[in-house]
């Protein structure tokens, strides 16, 4: 547990502290367990020191009342730096999924001296021309609009069912999915969370800086990973990130959705190793 300024961040590490560090930042409303243990162990076996953590309002980290996040978007980015500081890591590869990829973009501009490179997985593009890009599918938008209007269930089974419905909407792809395992993951997520109904607070966190519009100024090595079947953040966002960030490399996952699927672990890890080692 990393503590600073009345904030507590739950973390977990894999591998040898003497190896190059990789900090994993998960997306909105998702705790660190969605960086599956198998992926973290495979990354560690490749020779990295891997750290994952619960963003605020997820898992065992500090939570706030639903709809009232006590932080900005930039505070979430600073949390990642605080985790690195607590582990006494001078420089790390930062890998972010979805919202975590947006936080990674911010960190690369705010704290470049602590960033060895960035990996943007299923992340969104906000720089020049972003207003003309497609965004989430109608089905995804409708689901979250309904969630915002509905009172969340109070029991574990009900919360798991809502989480499963969310997963079915947001993780459509041509990859095979083990729904029984996903259900177990969601139950674990609900049961280990102190305030599971606060996880949607990320949607209310205000962006106060201009970094997301200045990614052409990123001066660290970058790998962009994006699935062609992503219904949450369409593939074109990955293309635009790779075109805009200087010298970025794009890894296209044909048939993948808004996910890091186990079938893609090896190719993603190999791309990380090739790009940064």
Image: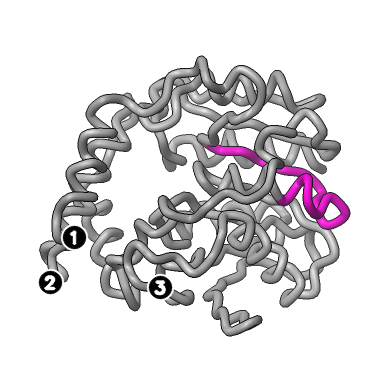
Badge 3 marks a residue whose secondary structure is loop
Residue at (24%, 65%) from the top-left corner?
187
Residue at (74%, 35%) from the top-left corner?
222
Q: Is residue 28 left or right of residue 273?
A: left
User: Between disc 1 and disc 2, whose residue precedes?
Assistant: 2
Alpha carbon separation for disc pair 1 and 2: 9 Å
Badge 2 marks a residue whose secondary structure is loop
Front: mark 3 or 2: 3
Q: How many marks?
A: 3
Above or below, comparing residue 217 to residue 57 in the picture: above
Q: Is residue 225 left or right of residue 168?
A: right
Front: mark 1 or 2: 2
Residue topped by disc 3: 64
Badge 1 marks a residue whose secondary structure is helix
Alpha carbon separation for disc pair 3 and 2: 19 Å
Residue topped by disc 1: 160
User: Between disc 3 and disc 2, whose residue precedes?
Assistant: 3
| Quadrant of the snapshot with the N terminus | bottom right
x and y, in percent, of residue 205 in the image? 48, 55
Indicate the quadrant where residue 185 lies: bottom left
Is residue 178 found inside the magenta-colored segment of the image?
no
User: Between disc 3 and disc 1, whose residue precedes?
Assistant: 3
x and y, in percent, of residue 151 in the image? 14, 60
x and y, in percent, of residue 218 in the image? 80, 36
Please state the extent of the stretch shown in magenta in the rendering. 107-121
**Depth check: 51 or 215 in front?**
215
Residue topped by disc 2: 155
| Quadrant of the snapshot with the C terminus | top right
């Amino acid at each position: 547990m990393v503590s600073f300024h009345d904030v507590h961040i739950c973390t977990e590490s894999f591998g040898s502290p003497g190896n190059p560090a990789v900090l994993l930042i998960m997306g909105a409303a998702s705790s660190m367990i969605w960086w599956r243990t198998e992926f973290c162990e495979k990354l560690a076996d490749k020779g990295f020191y891997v750290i994952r953590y619960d963003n605020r309002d997820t898992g065992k980290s500090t939570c706030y009342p639903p709809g009232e996040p006590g932080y900005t978007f930039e505070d979430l980015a600073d949390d990642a730096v605080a985790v690195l500081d607590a582990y006494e890591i001078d420089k790390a590869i930062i890998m972010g999924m979805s919202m975590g990829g947006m936080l990674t973009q911010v960190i690369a501009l705010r704290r470049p001296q602590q960033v060895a490179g960035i990996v943007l997985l299923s992340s969104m593009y906000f720089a020049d021309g972003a207003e003309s890009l497609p965004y989430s599918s109608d089905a995804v938008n409708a689901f979250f609009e309904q969630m915002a209007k509905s009172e969340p269930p109070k029991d574990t089974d009900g919360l798991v069912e809502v989480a499963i419905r969310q997963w079915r909407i947001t993780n459509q792809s041509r990859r095979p999915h083990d729904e029984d395992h996903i259900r177990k993951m969601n139950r674990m997520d609900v049961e280990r969370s102190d305030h599971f109904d606060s996880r949607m607070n990320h949607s209310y966190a205000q962006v106060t800086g201009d970094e997301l519009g200045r990614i052409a100024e990123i001066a660290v090595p970058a790998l962009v990973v994006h699935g062609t079947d992503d219904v949450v953040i369409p593939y074109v966002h990955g293309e635009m990130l790779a075109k805009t960030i200087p010298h970025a490399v794009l890894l296209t996952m044909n048939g993948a959705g808004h996910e890091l699927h186990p079938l893609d672990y090896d190719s993603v890890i190999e791309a990380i190793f090739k790009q940064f080692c």
